[in-house]
Image (spheres, rainbow, N blue to C red):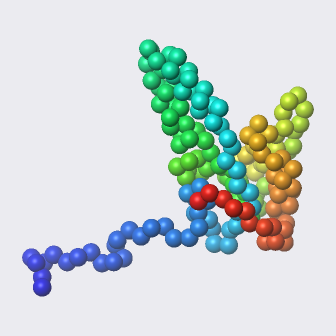
Amino acid sequence: MQHGGWQPAPHAMVPQPMAGPTVARVPLLPGERVLYFKKPDQGIARVGYILAGILTLPILLGFYLVYLGINYEEKVSHYYVITNFRIFTVNARGRILELVNVPEITNLNHRTGNGTNTLSVHSNAQFIQFRHEERHDMAVVKNLLANVRNPAFAQQAPAVAFEP
């Protein structure tokens, strides 16, 4: 029975939930596997913002610091992801911050000394740094990055567990 010409929307117009696997809210490409996943622990910074906010509460800066401390996880923290196709960092909202496609890697640079231990991945357009302070297992990351451009290694490397 028709009611004044109104027709229900077809099923295809109803939004469907995103299908397929994701890593930190970023959809994986077909055939893409996660080889490394790390979320740096930045709890001390979060506590620091809250404490500084409480100490300076009488002024507006205190309110802002308390807000930053409460929302630190969503606003500032990010995930490091290495897959067989790309290397990227992504924030808690699923927005990709830095991206290097594996075939476009031009240089790997490992710097140590003077208290630094940094591994940089460069392409012509972007670079990503893995810092020891963020508690990366630098030996694992260095091995993965050195071999990920080899298609046989990328297909045989075991996938790791990651947070969806």
**Residue most toward the left?**
4
Residue 97: percent from the left, percent from the top?
61, 47
Residue 92: percent from the left, percent from the top?
56, 48
Q: Closest to the observer: 142 or 56? A: 56
Q: Which image quarter is the C terminus in?
A: bottom right
Q: Residue at x 63, y 31 (%)?
A: 45
Is 93 placed left or right of 149 in the picture?
left
Asked if 26 appears above or below 117 in the picture, the reply is below
Residue 65: percent from the left, percent from the top?
51, 25
Is 109 placed left or right of 84 in the picture?
right
Q: Is residue 97 visible?
A: no
Q: Residue at x 52, y 17 (%)?
A: 55
Q: Is residue 84 visible?
A: yes
Q: Which image quarter is the N terminus in?
A: bottom left
Is 50 placed left or right of 30 in the picture?
left
Q: Residue at x 19, y 77 (%)?
A: 7
Asked if 59 appears above or below 30 in the picture, the reply is above
Q: Residue at x 67, y 41 (%)?
A: 41
Write down the quadrant of residue 163 in the picture. bottom right
Residue 66: percent from the left, percent from the top?
49, 27
Asked if 80 appears above or below 132 in the picture, the reply is below
